[in-house]
Amino acid sequence: AALTRAAARGVRVQVLVDGGGSPTLPSDYWRDLEAAGGQAHIFNPLTFRHFSLRSHRKLLLIDDATAVTGGFNISLEYDGDGVTTGWRDFGIELQDPAALRQLAASFDHLFTHHLARRFLRHRWQHRTLLRPAYYRLPGPVLFSGPRLVRNQFSRQLLQTLRHARHVRIVSAYFAPSFRLRCALRAVALRGGTVELLLAGKSDVPLAQRAARSIYGSLLKAGVVIWEYQPQILHAKLAVVDDNVFAGTANLDARSLAINHELMVHFCEPRLATEARAMFAADLRHSQQILLEDWQRTRTLLTRFRGAIARFLLTTVDPWLARRQMRDAR
């Protein structure tokens, strides 16, 4: 209703929702908004043959002066404090001019190419599936997309971890690449501190099984793992010394190799201090996972389920995404 009222008074209102994230919206959901002069598109409408490539970005951009991004969607699940009710999530408000230019350009690009399979078919036919132009804009926003374009977030995170001393990461879904797991282990093995806050409750049980299946090698290296207990954890945050990464990407194959994502990166001590305080506050509602406790849970059936979950999420899902991108029609 608020968007419709804004459009009626002459504000340019554009809404882009993901076809996989909003599959139950009725066909006439945006009728009033469009009648008032607004525009609404579905990114890559969900079909059996085109279900994989998704936009996981969450962005509110107002007058090219203020932007909000983070893990939260517009949904009833987020109505609460994340402790007593509602999912645990957070975001970041931006007024940085460079970031606003990046975010506006990225939105315009996806809004124009919301029928992703047409865009992919054109790019494959012309052999030009490279980085979109907005990837090259200077600023603090790091973009992720299909593996066929450079993943700025994972590259920057890996680079930051090379000389890191203190690492704190919050990830709702955790199935990182072997290279990223090695980077986290390396920080701990050389005497740094690495703390991971992961989901004790999850809306995707398969993702939780995959995450728990790789705890062992991290715990043995000295990585400290916590699981958030009161509600479903949906937040995404990394604090590496004075570097803060916040946005929409999890540390899993889908965020790092398939989805359209965005993360904001600032190297700012004050912001890092605030992020560490927020991390510490969430630990009061979390349970530490000890190596001996984890080992006791690793029955043959648990190991089998974890291996299958990890294979599906880190191998099968990216393979299907690549096939669907090549077969876009």
Image: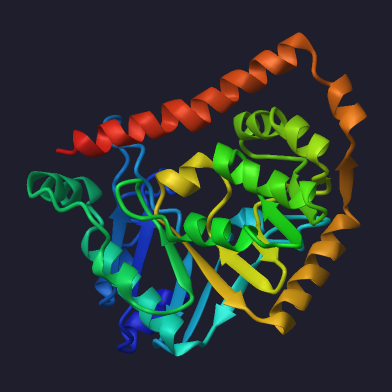
Q: Residue 76 vs residue 82: left or right?
A: left
Vertical placement of residue 311 versus 148, above or below: above
The structure residue drawn at horizontal position 83% and vertical position 59%, both measured from the top left corner, is 282
Task: Give the position of the N terminus as an image quadrant.
Answer: bottom left
Q: Give the x, y percent position of residue 284.
A: 91, 57
Quadrant (top left/top right/bottom left/bottom right) for the C terminus: top left
Q: Residue 173, percent across and down?
A: 62, 43
Asked whether 166 or 69 is in front, the reply is 166
Total marks in image: 0
Q: Is residue 140 left or right of residue 297?
A: left
Question: In this rendering, would 169 be left or right of 44?
Answer: right
Q: How is the image coloured?
A: rainbow
> Which residue is situated farthest in the left direction here?
126
Q: Is residue 33 visible?
A: no
Residue 214 in view, yes or no: yes
Residue 79 image position (x, y, % from top left): 68, 61
Give the residue at the far top of this rendering: 300
Q: What residue lies at 39% left-to-right and 86% top-to-bottom? A: 64
Compared to residue 222, the image places residue 136 above or below, namely below
Q: Residue furthest front?
A: 190
Q: Residue at x 79, y 63 (%)?
A: 279
**Residue 298's spot in the image, x, y percent?**
80, 19
Relative vertical location of residue 320 with respect to residue 89 in this rendering, above or below: above
Frontmost residue, 213 versus 100 = 213
Between 1 and 47, the one lying in front of the other is: 47
Residue displayed at 53% across by 24% down: 311
